[in-house]
Amino acid sequence: MFSPTPLETEALLLSLKVAFWSVLITLPLGLLTAWLLARKKFYGHALLNGVVHLPLVLPPVVIGFFLLAMLGRQGPIGAFLLDTFGITIAFTWQGAAIASAIMAFPLMVRAIRLSMESVDLGLEDAARTLGASPFRVFYSITLPLISPGILAGVVLSFARSLGEFGATITFVSNIPGETRTLPLAIFSLVQTPGGEAGALRLVVLSIILALAALLFSEYLAARAKRRVEG
């Protein structure tokens, strides 16, 4: 019978917390970015699209090092936050959430953008001709139609955050109880003599969580699509 140790339970709960806040950080900015890329043509559109998708092609340690350089205690943003507000982001679970959010951001944007590009613009135009404000058009027409993409983006980003390793260990290290998420706990157990059994349990747990997230994403997207289509 599977009986996780306190350290394994701690890593699981921390991973879930980091993934939750990662999605919460990502969603508002992901919606705005997807809307800009899908609906607006402007100078620098291709550059913005490239920057958004950079985490997909860059080594995660590059992202982690960049965050450490910018948000570490000696970095320009990190030093300002520390001196002004007494806030430290590096080597904390909040930093792990930021690193995970950046790595999951392209998945969120892509899912929402594809959904937004499939919306019939004639429906929005019709609502505007009837006197609806831009906010009302987005809230009552666009948002329900793109809800499958939003749900898919949320769940995929959550799953991606659960599995983030490279950027996390570079930016916030591997601190038990603070930044040691599931992938980092697996790494630590692999490096520990006799830790293979614990690592295997966490590997299986990670696979189950990722698969459940993907299946849940498909279920929510299909349900939302049926609701939108009536």
Image (cartoon, rainbow, N blue to C red):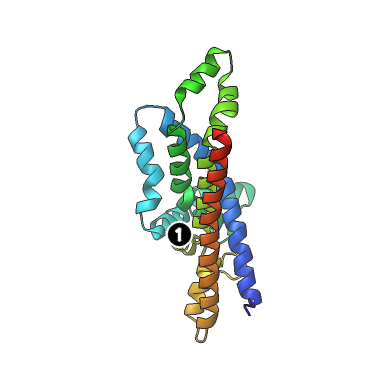
Residue occupying the point 38% across, 46% down? 53
Describe residue 51's horizontal placement relative to residue 19 as left or right. Answer: left
Residue annotated with mark 1: 167
Q: Residue at x 58, y 62 (%)?
A: 15
Q: Secondary structure at mark 1?
A: helix
Residue furthest out toward the front: 230
Residue 113 lies, in percent from the top left, at 44, 37
Residue 221 image position (x, y, % from top left): 53, 45
Depth check, front residue: 212 or 86: 212
- Mark 1 surroundings: few (<14), some (14-19) or many (≥20) residues within 10 A: many
Q: Nearer the viewer, residue 66 or 196?
A: 196
Residue nearest the observer in this picture, 164 or 137: 137
Left or right placement of residue 221 versus residue 13 in this view: left
* Furthest residue toward bottom: 194
Where is 186 relative to 99, above or below? below
Residue at 53% of width from left, 82% of height from top? 197
- Residue at screen point 61% across, 63% down: 14
Instruction: State the count of labels.
Output: 1
Please determine whether, in this image, residue 26 is positioned above or below residue 194. above
**Position in image of residue 84 (x %, y %):** 61, 46
Q: Is residue 176 visible?
A: yes
Q: Quadrant of the C terminus?
A: top right
**Percent from the top left, x then y, of residue 207?**
50, 66
- Can residue 89 be seen here? The reply is no
**Quarter occupied by the N terminus:** bottom right
Type of residue at label 1?
Answer: Ala
Residue 2 drawn above or below residue 182: below
